[in-house]
Image (spheres, rainbow, N blue to C red):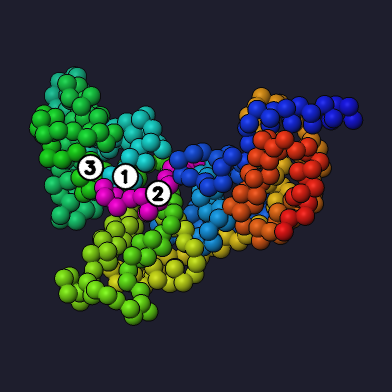
């Protein structure tokens, strides 16, 4: 008992340093999370993994209201499916350089050595292991490039042939030209290059050119030993800029300037949608999209049908991300508190440490669950507020607890 009382006093002292265990309530694709999902949500994750593993190409919609943890789900999936390259993308942040952004994220996920291994594998398939003459291994670079273009050009559209030439040149130069290897590697890593540097490599564009980025991305994903998952958050934003059919009040009719069919926003959205759907041509790429509602998914399907109706067959039945069950808030609280202490160099924290949910209690957590209606983000907001009171208020802990035991 004395040990537990000492622990409680130590925990309160740590909190008084101004560190809130629940300091953020919006997950992002940039900040890694390791807490995992609550027990009630694990079957949902298992279902997603089953679909991903059984489909080489698919589009899987995840539907959940604001604050239900769709971005947190990304981290749980990434941590569980560590044998896949899992990339996060928010459409609200990406309009220009779409493929370049995805390529940059892909390179960051796989790392430099796997990139080198893939391009080495490609060049060997194109004939780099054949000897030109003599005992020593000397390759005919131009012959290899010609063979590469012959082998893979049918996998790309006609308007991608210039980009394909750049990509084949970049890969073969990196592997076979020791004098240009460093510059070629910079190109492969997606660095922005000026015209002088590109001329030195005998190329037209760097990977900021969307076609170049797409061709390179397709080659890498299709030749990676790991599967690839693209997790696109806020996917309904791709159609939200479309004009509403029910909006009858209009001070200015944009069709006067832009014609009756498409407004600039709609053209931009359709262009972005076409780029997303183009990713479906990459073998081995599974796309997961998150949306806030079933009507949003229906609107997205309509938009997809207008662009390419054949894509609809790749769209799986949606998986719904519901609010927390009541038991989840207790599990979530304990996991966060234990993680907070472990990050503060507390080791071997017993499962019974927070059996009474100190410094809160069961009644407070029950009230938070009711008040938040089980929404994870709202639960976190309440927890942040309560712990800020514990940290910064001059009130005694008993007074703070009493206040939150009667949440109104």
Q: Is residue 222 left or right of residue 353?
A: left
Q: Residues within 10 Å of mark 1 (few under 14, many from 20)?
A: some
Question: Between marks 2 and 3, how big is the CA–CA gap?
Answer: 17 Å
Mark 2–mark 3 contact, CB under 8 Å? no
Residue wearing tag 3:
208
In the figure, residue 80 lies in which quadrant?
top right
Alpha carbons under labels 2 and 1: distance apart: 9 Å
* Image quadrant where residue 116 sits: top left
Residue highlighted by disc 2: 89
At horizontal 56% and vertical 42% (from top left) the residue drawn is 24
The numbered mark at residue 219 is: none
Task: Indicate the position of residue 51 as horizontal and vertical percent values.
Answer: 51, 58
Residue drawn at point x = 70 percent, y = 56 percent? 369
Q: Secondary structure at mark 3?
A: loop
Secondary element at tag 1: helix
The residue that label 1 is drawn on is 101
Q: Is residue 21 visible?
A: no
- Image quarter in which the N terminus is found: top right
Range shown magenta: 81-98
Q: In the image, residue 291 lies at what x, y percent?
A: 47, 61
Magenta segment includes 92: yes
* Residue 202 image point, x, y percent: 10, 34
Q: Disc 2 vs disc 1: Cβ atoms closer than 8 Å? A: yes
């Amino acid at each position: 008992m004395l040990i537990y009382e000492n622990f409680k006093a130590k925990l309160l002292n740590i909190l008084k340093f101004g560190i809130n265990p629940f300091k953020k309530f919006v997950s992002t694709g940039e900040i890694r999370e390791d807490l995992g999902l609550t027990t009630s949500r694990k079957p949902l994750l298992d279902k997603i993994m089953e679909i991903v593993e059984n489909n080489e190409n698919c589009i899987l919609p995840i539907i959940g209201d604001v604050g239900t943890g769709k971005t947190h789900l990304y981290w749980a999936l990434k941590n569980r499916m560590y044998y896949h390259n899992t990339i996060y993308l928010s459409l609200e942040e990406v309009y220009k350089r779409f493929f370049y952004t995805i390529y940059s994220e892909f390179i960051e996920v796989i790392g430099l050595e796997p990139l080198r291994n893939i391009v080495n594998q490609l060049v060997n398939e194109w004939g780099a292991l054949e000897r030109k003459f003599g005992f020593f291994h000397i390759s005919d670079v131009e012959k290899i490039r010609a063979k590469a273009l012959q082998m893979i050009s049918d996998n790309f559209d006609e308007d991608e042939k210039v980009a394909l030439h750049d990509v084949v040149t970049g890969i073969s130069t990196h592997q076979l030209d020791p004098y240009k290897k460093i510059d070629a590697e910079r190109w492969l890593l997606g660095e922005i290059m000026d015209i002088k540097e590109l001329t030195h490599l005998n190329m037209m564009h760097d990977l900021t050119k969307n076609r170049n980025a797409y061709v390179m991305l397709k080659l890498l994903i299709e030749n990676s030993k790991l599967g690839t998952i693209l997790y696109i958050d806020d996917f309904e934003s791709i159609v939200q800029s479309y004009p509403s059919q029910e909006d009858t009040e209009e001070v200015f009719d944009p069709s006067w300037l832009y014609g009756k069919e498409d407004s600039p926003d709609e053209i931009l959205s359709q262009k972005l949608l076409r780029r997303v759907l183009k990713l479906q041509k990459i073998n081995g790429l599974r796309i997961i999209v998150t949306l806030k509602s079933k009507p949003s998914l229906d609107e997205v399907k309509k938009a997809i049908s207008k662009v390419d109706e054949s894509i609809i067959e790749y769209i799986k039945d949606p998986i719904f991300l519901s609010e927390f069950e009541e038991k989840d808030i207790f599990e979530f609280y304990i996991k966060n508190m234990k993680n907070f202490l472990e990050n503060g160099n507390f080791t071997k924290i017993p499962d019974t440490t927070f059996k009474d949910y100190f410094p809160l209690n069961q009644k407070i957590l029950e009230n938070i669950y009711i008040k938040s209606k089980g929404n994870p983000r709202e639960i976190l907001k309440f927890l942040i507020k309560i712990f800020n009171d514990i940290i910064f208020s001059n009130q005694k802990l008993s007074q703070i607890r009493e206040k939150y035991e009667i949440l109104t």
